[in-house]
Amino acid sequence: MTPKHSKLPPTGLFVPQDPAAYQAALALYPGDLLPDDRYEDWSSEARETLRQDHLRLLVRFAKLFEKQKEYTEAIESLSRL
């Protein structure tokens, strides 16, 4: 289930088959949103949505590698979870 504010399409919709697309998307995530405001309620929902989107991208990336029988790359992607 995709969080209500997620920018990613639900699983099963368009999923890129180009590893470069995943690498570009993953490079855009610098880490937790507003880490200095980690305990502020107003930022927690957006932070968690972005974190979940990032994790979902890592899993999709690993599945792409698995489909292409590139198991080392799949494991590397999953190790970032």
Image (cartoon, rainbow, N blue to C red):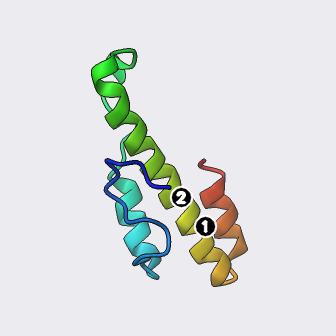
Picture coordinates of residue 74 (x, y %)? 65, 67
Badge number at residue 3? none
Specify whether 71 is left or right of 43: right
Residues tagged 1 and 2 counted as in contact (Cβ below 8 A): yes
Badge number at residue 58? 2
Instruction: Tell me the SS state at disc 2.
Output: helix
Q: Nearer the viewer, residue 30 or 64?
A: 64
Q: Is residue 61 above or below residue 55?
A: below
Q: Residue at x 44, y 76 (%)?
A: 15
Instruction: Tell me the SS state at disc 1.
Output: helix
Specify whether 9 is left or right of 80: left
Residue 32 seen in the current view? no
Q: What is the crowding at mark 1: few (fewer than 14 residues within 10 Å), some, or many (at least 20)?
A: many
Q: Residue at x 42, y 36 (%)?
A: 48
**Residue beneath disc 1:** 62
Q: Is residue 61 above or below residue 49?
A: below
Residue kind at label 2, given as amino acid type: Leu
